[in-house]
Amino acid sequence: MLRRRPLTRIAWGAIPLALLLASALSSQQVPTRLTLEDALQIAEQNNPNYLATRNDVDVDDWNVRAAYGALTPSLSVGGNVGWVGAGEQNFGGGIIGSDLGVTDQPNFYSSGYSAGLNWNLSGNEWYGPATARAGRRVTESRIDETRILLQSQVTAAYLEVLRQSDEVELANQQLERSRFNLRLAEAQAELGSSTLLDVRQAEVQVGRSEVALLQAETAQETANLRLLQQMGVDLSARPELVTEFGLEAPEYELDALYRRAVEDNPVLRTRRETVEADRVGVKVARSAYLPSLNFDSRISGFTREASNVDGQIQRAQAGVASQVASCQSTNDLYSRLANPLPAIDCSQFVFTDAMRQGIIDANDAFPFNFLTSPPSATLSISFPLFQGLSRQQRLETAQTQLRDSEHRVREQELALEADLAVNLAQVRTAWQSAEIEDRNVGLADEQLRLATERYRLGGIPFLDLIEAETVKAQADRDRLNAIYAYHDAITNLEAVVGRPLRGR
């Protein structure tokens, strides 16, 4: 069984100071030895895009609570405090109290309270919790979708760092071989077996190898930064990647993968949850044809107090005087009759201290001696008979949206089956390519060894040695690309299935 060669530790280049200052600091500590599992866990805790998506579920949780709260009655309480200044109060062209000789009104202070209970029940409230729960399930599926995408991106970035690390290793090996060839050409020139042209060609080859190493180190540094960016951590961290990926023959079966993907593919789950949410939406649209119920109950109270009761006492005294005058007029009338009637005792109409105290006590109400109004309660039922065609339009829209969602589920099922077949074929092709490239590396090694020996013996020109060296370098690079193409294909297949397929 073919396995990739052990990975060397990652050689980190110097990171520019400006990049360090611009990097976002994270509270998550990056371990010095970073496994893929660590990278995935840190990314889920720090990646801004994933965190922003995950925060949406908090809103949906409150939507569910609010939907249940809408099924319960609402209670409201209120209070007020008022003041009316002293002076004449004119209503309808007349001065209040002018008939009794009282026109200068005192300051008035008032207060009041009210409390009400209202309960409304219609189709929107009845189906509100189901709508909110369905929306939350859709959000949770989208969070899973984002999480699976993040895992795929972090895994790809992790693999890219390993790939570039191995590219640096190959570039170092190529540089060492180029330097060896230069020493060999110089030795052959001293012996007279080669010309100075061979030495110059070897020097050019060393320069090219140095450029390739510099480019590989830059690509490695870039891959490192991109991995940390995906993880959402400080870009100055310098972990050592320790997870190794083995090459194993793909023994996946398409039917088994499809059964897994039907359950775990995040896009398919999101679309299925959207269908369920749209079914609830159809029920809500139909509920517009149902009656609605409303119950309302209220209580209230008020106070009103004058700054002084002189006017009230004057009005009371004037009223008593009016009663005495009326009594005397009546007695005078009785005495003029042919048969006089007994006179009424007018002395009973007097303004007493008790009456004065009663006025004073009655005025002592502000702010909490409320006079309570009678409570009220109302129960009403509303039957919608005709509202134009708006209800039917909303129902048709909801039903069309449901059918569209069902079609999208079927579309995703077909896409899932095709994507699995394509990605599985790519995995198998990558595996076979890696096996072939491994054999090619062995042949290139043997070819380079023979070319080196023949050049040392003067059997071939230096250009043939350079060509063998080029073939060897290309074989190493092709093998490396084939290995990582296999791992990339596995990563893509895992993203389609929605779960890991290889041991880590």
Image (cartoon, rainbow, N blue to C red):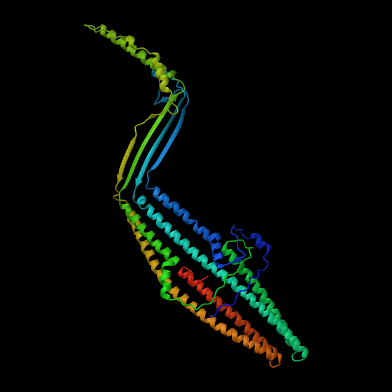
Give the quadrant of residue 405.
Answer: bottom left
Choose between 116 and 247: the one closer to the eye.
Answer: 247
Residue at 50% from the left image edge and 66% from the top image edge: 149
Image position of 134 with respect to 13: above or below: above
Residue at 64% from the left image edge and 78% from the top image edge: 170
Residue at 38% from the left image edge and 13% from the top image edge: 352
At which x and y percent is residue 89?
43, 24
Residue at 39% from the left image edge and 59% from the top image edge: 277
Figure disc tally: 0
At which x and y percent is residue 380?
31, 43
Q: Is 65 on the left or on the right of 377, as rendered?
A: right
At which x and y percent is residue 439?
56, 85
Give the quadrant of residue 359.
Answer: top left
Choose between 11 and 217: the one closer to the eye.
Answer: 11
Choose between 404 and 296: the one closer to the eye.
Answer: 296
At which x and y percent is residue 348?
33, 11
